[in-house]
Image (tube, helix red, strand yellow):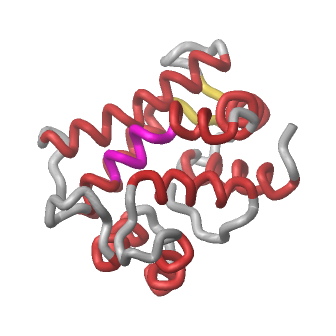
Amino acid sequence: MTTSVQEQRLRRRFDMWDKNGDGTIDRSDWAGEAKRILLSFGESESSPKGRALADAYLGMWEYVAGQAGVGVDGALGFEEFRNVAAEQVLDRGQAGFDQVLRPTISAIADLCDTDGDGQVSPQEFQRWIGAIGSDESTAGTAFKLIDTDGDGQLSIEELIEAVHRYHSGELEFSLL
């Protein structure tokens, strides 16, 4: 069962995917988001990082669609999406976030990580915020709240935890 904050945030996520406003999301919506993110980073879909991001997004779609029983070529309305997200991600806590979201978060972090150190710096994070269509002026504040170990870098673990905290209502900054 989702809380009102979780429901609100799932609705926001659903509406972001539903670009054509038809009240459903399908594989093309998820592929389109991956393409928009790659474009904002100036990354080719055929590059290793581009393929990793597209594969992560489509893998997430395939998992969600499979759990909903609509198949990869089907579509989900909000209620179906909310139910799958609640059962497979939110209700399972860290294990759900790790299984369903880790590949996507890792792929976006890899796009951001221009210096190849395996961490996301404040400057790299600002690009992330812009790439997902959020207000870049919030990047500094968000970074400080997400950097729980205070080392001035964001690890994959901190980023996954931030997405978890966002959906539980503890953090106001969306990373996906």
Q: Position of residue 67 (x, y in %)?
A: 63, 18
Q: Is residue 165 magenta?
A: no
Q: Is residue 47 above or below residue 92?
A: below
In the picture, measured across the screen, residue 155 lies left or right of residue 65, that is left
Quadrant in which residue 41 is drawn: bottom left
In the picture, measured across the screen, residue 57 lies left or right of residue 98, that is left
Is any atom of residue 127 visible in this view?
yes
Is any atom of residue 33 visible in this view?
no
* Placement of the N terminus among the 4 image quadrants: top right
Q: Is residue 106 magenta?
A: yes
In the picture, measured across the screen, residue 106 lies left or right of residue 175, that is left
Task: Using the image as rendered, state which of residue 98 and residue 52 is in the foreground.
Answer: 98
- Magenta segment's dominant SS is helix
Q: Position of residue 145 (x, y in %)?
A: 56, 75
Q: Residue at x 32, y 32 (%)?
A: 55
Q: Residue at x 34, y 52 (%)?
A: 108
Q: Residue at x 48, y 22 (%)?
A: 62
Magenta residues, start to end: 101-108
